[in-house]
Amino acid sequence: MLRIQEAVSAAQTFELMKKMLGHLVPEAELMVKSEIAFEINRLKKEKKAVILGHNYMEPALYHSIPDHVGDSLGLSRISASTDAERIVFCGVRFMAETAKILNPGKMVLLPARVAGCSLASSITAEDVRRIKKAYPGVPVVTYINTYADVKAETDVCCTSSNAVSIVNQLESDTVICLPDEFLARNVARETGKRVLFPGDMIRNGEPSMVVWNGKCEVHEKFTVGDITAARAQFPDTVVVAHPECPPEVVEASDYSGSTTAMVDFVKHSDAKRFLLLTECSMSDNIAAENPGKEMLGMCSIRCPHMNEITLEDTLECLREDKYQIEIDEDIRVKAKKSLDRMLEMSA
Ligand code: 13P
Ligand code: SF4
């Protein structure tokens, strides 16, 4: 089937979008969005741009303009190796920064001025320096949901898809894992480590993980009660949770993994009904691609930062080359080491 990105006219873009999204998005909206999507796809060829879309992008954008979609790890790999002149990142700032760190010769564009993340803003480089001073020699693993200056203080980055494997590969029983407390607690459980907070003493011979108290403002809101209620209403529901959810929520779920792992899990499962504990656009994106499966998204819980990225702003971003990501070269070089190490360790 022809991809929407390859349509030769706005009318064909509309027909293809209607086929894919007609059961989710009203036709009148698809009419407007297909015109914008067609213009973006035309302009991106002219400007030799590649568009990367995180799995949380809204359905009309997600299915119509990205050349590649995926989770943080997948999109980092693509950013590192693309030969396009421009990388337009339909995601949040730390993702676009990661692309610039890995591929500094390219112009990296974010379609929104801010597009933050509550995890990335929960910790500063100075915080990391203080923790390192308190635990000399202990390796620092930092979630990719951080800004460049924090990555620059780090030994190795991780994402939700490789955090357990990276912690297991380190030759140290004790690690510092920042800044997502819940991701770290979930990883500590899987790797058999006791959770400590900065200031706590490491007990001799006891594998430990020093964590920070950052939280994802979306995933922290899901509760075990949400799971119990969904299962009471629909007993055949399979519950899929992102590892940024609280540990008791992950434990009560049937499966936990990165956003791409969640997409693949639903695709390959024989079940017919799923509750996705993550940003609700992803439920719509999966529903569009799996018409026989029902997604119970909890859409009162949204990521305002991911939702800053719209088709309208992506068109303006391409037209005007804004907003360009710039990173101090000294910080970029240090941050790249921790990202390169992560990519080597998750080859
Ligand atoms: P993934 O790497 O699993 O896509 O997660 C990114 C994110 O921000 C989830 O909230
Ligand atoms: Fe950050 Fe949470 Fe939004 Fe992901 S969902 S970008 S972790 S605030």
Image (cartoon, rainbow, N blue to C red):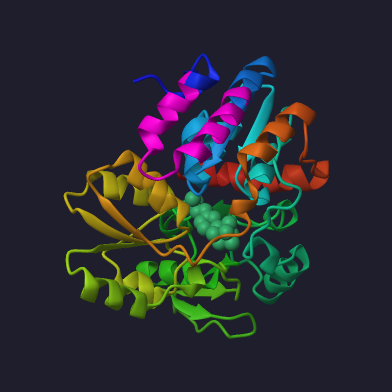
Q: Height in image: 91 above or below 5? A: below
Query: How many numbered marks are there?
Result: 0
Check residue 204 for magenta coloring.
Answer: no
Residue occupying the far front of the picture: 28
Q: Position of residue 31 (x, y in %)?
A: 52, 32
Would you identify the image quadrant in which residue 202 lies?
A: bottom right
Q: State the extent of the magenta-drawn residues as a range.
A: 12-39
Q: Considering the image in quadrants, where does the N terminus appear?
A: top left
* Residue nearer the viewer, 18 or 140: 18
Q: Residue at x 47, y 27 (%)?
A: 14
* Residue nearer the viewer, 156 or 135: 156
Q: Position of residue 26 (x, y in %)?
A: 45, 43
Specify the principal SS of the magenta part: helix
Check residue 37 for magenta coloring.
Answer: yes
Q: Residue at x 61, y 18 (%)?
A: 42
Q: Height in image: 146 above or below 207? A: above
Q: Position of residue 250 (x, y in %)?
A: 36, 70
Residue 344 visible in the current orientation = no
Q: Residue at x 75, y 55 (%)?
A: 149
Q: Is residue 132 left or right of residue 21?
A: right
Q: Residue at x 56, y 74 (%)?
A: 210
Residue 306 visible in the current orientation = yes
* Residue nearer the viewer, 98 or 19: 19
Q: Height in image: 228 above or below 308? A: below
Would you identify the image quadrant in which residue 206 lies?
A: bottom left
Q: Height in image: 185 above or below 9? A: below
Q: Position of residue 147 (x, y in %)?
A: 70, 55
Q: Considering the image in quadrants, where does the C terminus appear?
A: top left
